[in-house]
Image (cartoon, grey):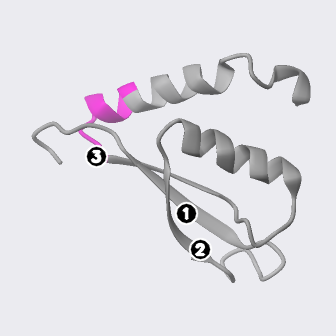
Amino acid sequence: MKAYHRQGIGNLLLDEAEEWCADQEVAFLQVKTLSASHPDLNYAKTREFYRSVGFLELEEFLELWRSVNPCLLMVKAISQGSFC
């Protein structure tokens, strides 16, 4: 919802998820979202958010969610600890 954008909620949620992953010795966090092959402006903002918090685009899957909904897989390294 637009009213909740730019309030820090996404960053707080991501911080908690990353802390949990680090505690579990999970090396990477991944998200799947609609790729830039689809013109939806809301998902452009979603991808922009993920990039701003350190996610990198890894692979696009054109048929995972059917061709009308191309999927983008993005990943982020959690820690450089001994489990990486």
Question: Does the residue at mark 1 contact the one at mark 2 (Cβ under 8 Å)?
Answer: yes
**Residue type beneath disc 2:** Glu
Q: Is residue 22 magenta?
A: yes
Where does residue 76 sit, x and y in percent of width and height?
Answer: 41, 47
Amino acid type at image mark 3: Ala
> Callout 3: helix, strand or loop?
loop
Q: Residues within 10 Å of mark 3 (few under 14, many from 20)?
A: some
Q: Position of residue 56 (x, y in %)?
A: 48, 54
First to last magenta residue range: 19-27
Earlier-in-chain disc, 1 versus 2: 2
Give the class, few, some or many, for how many residues have Cα within 10 Å of label 1's Cα (few <14, many ≥20): some
Distance between mark 1 and mark 3 Cα atoms: 16 Å
Q: Which residue is mark 3?
A: 27
Disc number placed over residue 51 in the picture, else none: none
Is residue 70 toward the left or the right of residue 42 in the image? left
In the image, residue 69 above or below residue 53: below
Alpha carbons under labels 2 and 3: distance apart: 21 Å
Furthest residue in direction left, as rendered: 82
Left or right, 19 with respect to 30, comes to: left
Q: How many marks?
A: 3
33 versus 20 height, above or below = below
The residue drawn where x is 89% and y is 21% is 3
| Element carrying mark 1 | strand
* Residue linked to disc 2: 60
Q: First in sequence: mark 1 or mark 3?
A: 3
Figure check: 11 above or below 21: above
Return the residue at label 1: 73
Q: How far across and how far down the image is residue 38, in percent?
A: 81, 69
Bin the neighbour count of mark 2 within 10 Å (Cα to Cα): few under 14, some 14-19, many 20 and up.
some
Give the quadrant of residue 35. Answer: bottom right
